[in-house]
Amino acid sequence: MLAGELTPRGLTSRLHQRYGHELPLTERLAELDDEYDVLDYDNGSADQVDAEVTAEAHRLAAHPHVPAEPTDTPS
């Protein structure tokens, strides 16, 4: 997507279809794909979701092994 080969929606859709919500590293992108699905129902803005997807893609490109939020709490 950052290279211009996919749209933000295309990126989230592919990742969501392949990994669902099971991969912590791409969980936020799966959630954003869900947000695209409900835009018509909650008067959301595709531009806003596109911006969030782009920001998350940049974050992943900069730190590809770090989930957005920790998935396990240390005991």
Image: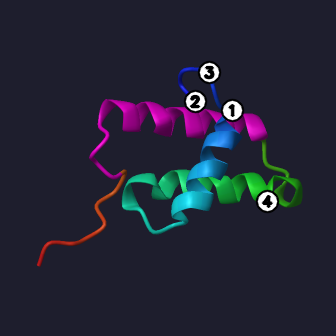
Residue position for label 2:
1
For the residues marked 2 and 3, what is the alpha-carbon distance in whole angstroms? 5 Å
| Mark 4 in CB contact with mark 3 (< 8 angstroms) | no
Q: Residues within 10 Å of mark 3 (few under 14, many from 20)?
A: few
What amino acid is at disc 2? Met
What secondary structure characterizes most of the magenta part?
helix
| Mark 4 in CB contact with mark 1 (< 8 angstroms) | no
Q: How many marks?
A: 4
| Mark 1 in CB contact with mark 2 (< 8 angstroms) | yes
What amino acid is at disc 1? Thr
Label of residue 57 in the image: none
Q: Nearer the viewer, residue 67 or 2?
A: 2
What amino acid is at disc 3? Gly
Sequence-earlier tag: 4 or 3: 3
For the residues marked 4 and 2, what is the alpha-carbon distance in whole angstroms? 22 Å
The magenta segment: 46-67
Quadrant holding the N terminus = top right
For the residues marked 4 and 1, what is the alpha-carbon distance in whole angstroms? 18 Å
For the residues marked 1 and 3, what is the alpha-carbon distance in whole angstroms? 7 Å
Quadrant holding the C terminus = bottom left
* Residue lying at the far top of the rendered structure: 3
Label of residue 38 in the image: 4
Residue 48 occupies quadrant? top right
Q: Nearer the viewer, mark 4 or mark 3?
A: 3
What amino acid is at disc 4? Val
Residue 12 visible at all: yes
52 lies above or below 5 = below
Residue position for label 3:
4
Residue position for label 1:
7
| Mark 2 in CB contact with mark 3 (< 8 angstroms) | yes
Residue 62 occupies quadrant? top left
59 drawn magenta: yes
